[in-house]
Image: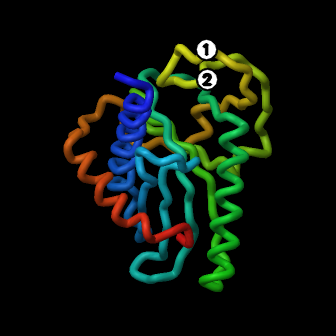
Amino acid sequence: MNTQQKFYEKSLLERAYLKMIFDKLPTTYDYKTWMTPADGFDVYDGVILRFEKGTSTLVDRMIIEIKVRDKFYPELIFEKIKYDDLKKVRRSMDLKTKKECFIDVKTRIIYVNVTPQGSFFFDIDKLSKDFEWVNEMHWVSTTDKSKGKINKILTKIDYTKAKRFNVKTGDYINPKATEIMMVNHQRTKQLGTIF
C-alpha cells in the first residue's frame, strides 16, 4: 500500500471517529457540523457550529483537529506548526464571517485525541497560555516511517486538562458507511468557510 493510500485511510478513520463524536454532542445546544475531505489538504478536520437550543443564534464555532491513537498517552503532543496553521484558519474564518455576514462569532480551536481510554477534547485557546514549546525528534510522517525523523517544535498536554467523551479507539466503524459519509461531505463543500 502506498503512502498516499495510507494517508487517505488514516484521514478517513479520523473522520469516522469525528462523526461518532458529532453524533454524541450534548443536547443542550443545536449543532451544524461538517468535515473536510479525507483526501484534501486542509489543516483542520472539521467544524462545529453551536447554536442556542431551538434558535438560529450562533454561540460559537469550533475548528476541530483530530488524532486517532492506538494507545493511551498521559501527555499528548501538539505541534507548533499545527497551532500556527489553525490560528491562521481561525483568523480567516472570523474575518470572512464579520465581513460577509456582519456577525462577530468566537471561534475556538479544539484538539481531539481518540485513544483506547476515550476521546480527549482540549480547548487550545484556554490552554495555550501554559504551553511550553520544546524541540524534539519525531517522525516526519506517521504513515511513512521511511522519511525518517526531524526536529519538531511541540508542546505536551496532560490528558487531565481535557474534557473526556466515551468514544474509544477500537469502537466499531463501518468502512462502507464512512466512504458514503465522505461522499456526502464532499457534496457540501460548497458551504465555503463562512461557517
Residue ID at (72%, 30%): 154
Do labels 1 and 2 touch, CB within 8 Å? yes
Instruction: Indicate which disc residue 148 carries.
Output: 1
Q: In the rendered image, which quarter is residue 83 located in? A: top right
Seen at 70% across and 72% down, the residue is: 95
State the image coordinates of residue 163 (x, y, percent, origin top left).
Answer: 53, 44
Under mark 1, the amino acid is Gly
Distance from Cα at disc 1 to Cα at disc 2: 6 Å
Answer above or below: position of 117 versus 144: below
**Of helix, strand and loop, which one carries label 2?**
loop
Q: Nearer the viewer, residue 103 or 167?
A: 103
Residue 11 in the image: state x and y as whole percent.
42, 39
Q: Is residue 170 above or below residue 60?
A: above
Q: Nearer the viewer, residue 138 or 62?
A: 138
Amino acid type of the residue that numbered disc 2 sits on in the rendered structure:
Val
50 or 135, which lies in front? 135
Q: Which mark, residue 140?
A: 2
Residue 87 horizontal/vertical position (percent) = 70, 53
Find residue 55 and name its label. none
In terms of sequence position, does the residue under pointer 1 or pointer 2 come before the other? 2
